[in-house]
Amino acid sequence: MNMPIPEVNSRHNAKDQTRFAALWRPALVQAFVKLDPRQLKRSPVMLVVALTAVLTTVLCFAPGGGVSTGVAVQIALWLWFTVLFANFAEALAEGRGKARADSLKAGSQGLTAQRRLRDGSYETVAASALRKDDLVRVVAGEMIPGDGEVIEGIAAVNEAAITGESAPVIRESGGDRSAVTGNTRLVSDWLLVRITSNPGESTLDRMIALVEGAKRQKTPNEIALDILLIGLTLIFLIVVVTLQPFAHFVGGSLPLIFLAALLVTLIPTTIGGLLSAIGIAGMDRLVRLNVIARSGRAVEAAGDVHTLMLDKTGTITFGNRRCSALHAAPGITAKELGEGALLASLADDTAEGKSIVEYLRQLHDFVDPPAGQFEAVAFSAETRLSGIDFQQHRYRKGAVDAVLAFVGMQRLEMPAALAREVERIAQSGGTPLLVCVDKRLLGVIHLKDVVKPGIRERFAELRKLGIRTVMVTGDNPLTAAAIAAEAGVDDVLAEATPEKKLARIRQEQNDGRLVAMCGDGANDAPALAQADVGMAMNDGTQAAREAANMVDLDSDPTKLLDVVQVGKELLVTRGALTTFSIANDVAKYFAILPALFAAIYPQLGVLNLMQLASPQSAILSAIVFNALIIIVLIPLALRGVRVQAASAAHLLRRNLLIYGLGGIVVPFAGIKLIDLLLNALNLV
Ligand SMILES: Nc1ncnc2c1ncn2[C@@H]1O[C@H](COP(=O)(O)OP(=O)(O)OP(=O)(O)O)[C@@H](O)[C@H]1O
Ligand SMILES: [K+]
Ligand SMILES: [Mg+2]
């Protein structure tokens, strides 16, 4: 049922065609610009073709060996076409991203910022002059001048320029929603932002570099393939050079121009010419998915990922865990619990803490303790506690096991009514926070969060691709299990600290599996850095965005499914075209050799199955075919081979059959057809 059906990816067909109409002209110009040897040397195979083209161009003036000048000129021209077609493919791939890069650049031009000086006043500077740790103030209506972290304030931000999503999002200091992106617009209030990137390193800069493909580094896979292609080129060079002694042996001779042309038809020019376009097109598909990848390597790893780890709050759920109710322990009044919970939350600037304060202020009028008379204990993912020390009392709230440990109580010693309440909250998928003062339990706070829609279906699709999903969360096992059941993950790791998350990833990697991690919090940063594919939610913290090697601008963890798809398509497309290219070249050898030697070894006539008209015609037809096949395969290289859920072995067999067999058969038909055409037109 899950049959692999490699086919040309048609999802973007209509769009691609309209784009092509706008793109081919500039790409044609670029094809000539890219004849620059400094650019050509990035592809060793194409460099060899270019050098051969130069040689044959020179030989046109004295072809020798009975080759007519007309044929020599045609061979030289088609060799140049071969290089130009490969350049054209690359230019087309780059062109698709360039329009987006240009509009991104235009949006950031002339942007200014209000930078805070030491004395607290502000100066106006160009956004491009901002450096890490500068403090800037942004007010409603202004653009945020760079990537940064909100230090003070709360505001709605329209991120459409970057994400294409026009609904504003809330950004505030503290907690997991504190990161802002340059070139997004503040639509309300004001923010004080600490800039976190130096010029040239921001999200916007990375996006531009990515879509332009200019600074694209070759991935380890591409380098390995390059080495294989260079090896094949050397082997065929030796093959071609040894043909001449054979010819001499029987008193004949092959013209140098034939040998040069033969070399080009035999070396892997098809994949050599399309390799870079395949890589750029893959990255472009990612950008269109609104995912920014730091390296092509991560995208390829995504194609092979086995385990996907996801943080719960903010990744699987929306992450606005808010206080929805309080339940007092037996013998504690609502007022006592409220006061304790408020004190434990006053100095807590996480979203959870703020929501508790807000909730309680609506119910009671409390008098705040004067500032400076208490000592804040900030929340940390390690302790999973927060609160204050005030008038010799220690007010705390936090994860159930953490607070029980704090008051020195076993789980079973908890008052039965409170234990039931905690369980009820957890089973509903909510997060229970116990509240205590010193050794006394006051009650429990119910934090509510909502699972993002569509998650379950997408995880089922991931499972079909053979990817296991694991939810890792700092929350208690019951809440974790409830959310896990709702989201449909395969496994859960609850009460996890950042270390535990990291250890789990290392363990999977030690078992030889590639791991992807999706997260948003500062506490996810180590895991995001350790994972082979680390995808940060754009609306998460700056720490997570910096540690990850991909950022999803839509903050949708299920986007990983698409990234896996792009990675697989990239690997399969490259593999398929390599198979095709090599099979093709070997077939050409047998297709044209009999014709080439017909005059020298008349006995070979029996092998001349294709009955090509003459050695001249055989060589020219092969060169023409060799160039045209690049053009024919450009759409496949740019769109990618469509990959559907299937085992790797199945895919491999299927592709070997289609592209291997195809690669052997196609040249026989193609070269014969061109031979007939050239002769009909009297060109040889
Ligand atoms: N402001 C807070 N004060 C006290 N305790 C908190 C606070 N926020 C969260 N907790 C408790 O600490 C636990 C861990 O929170 P944290 O945000 O680190 O979770 P996490 O590891 O990111 O996992 P997830 O995001 O999936 O919940 C929470 O489940 C909750 O019980
Ligand atoms: K070739
Ligand atoms: Mg989190």
Image: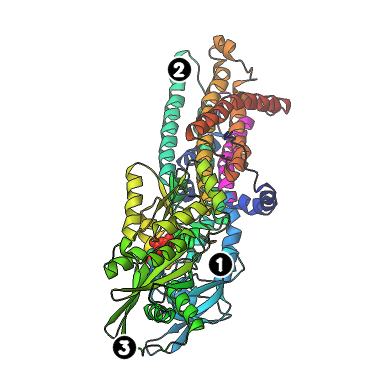
Front-lying residue, 352 or 410: 410
State the predominant SS element of the stretch in magenta.
helix
- Amino acid carrying mark 2 in the image: Phe
Q: Residue 105 carries which label?
A: 1
Q: Position of residue 271 (x, y in %)?
A: 52, 37
Front-lying residue, 502 or 583: 502
Q: Which of marks 1 and 3 is nearer the N terminus?
A: 1
Q: Which of marks 1 and 2 is nearer the N terminus?
A: 1
Label 1, label 3: how far apart the Cα atoms are: 50 Å
Give SS at disc 3: loop
Mark 1 or mark 2, which is nearer to you?
1
Mark 1 or mark 3, which is nearer to you?
3
Front-lying residue, 265 or 210: 210
184 to 315, vertically: above or below: below
Q: Name the residue under label 3.
A: 373
Magenta stretch contains residue 65:
yes
- Amino acid carrying mark 3 in the image: Gln
Give SS at disc 1: helix
Q: Position of residue 523 (x, y in %)?
A: 37, 63
Label 1, label 2: how far apart the Cα atoms are: 60 Å
Front-lying residue, 112 or 457: 457
Residue 529: quarter of image:
bottom left
Q: Name the residue under label 2.
A: 246
Give SS at disc 2: helix
Ligand 1: image quarter = bottom left
- Amino acid carrying mark 1 in the image: Lys
Q: Earlier in the sequence, mark 2 or mark 3?
A: 2
* Extent of the magenta region: 64-92
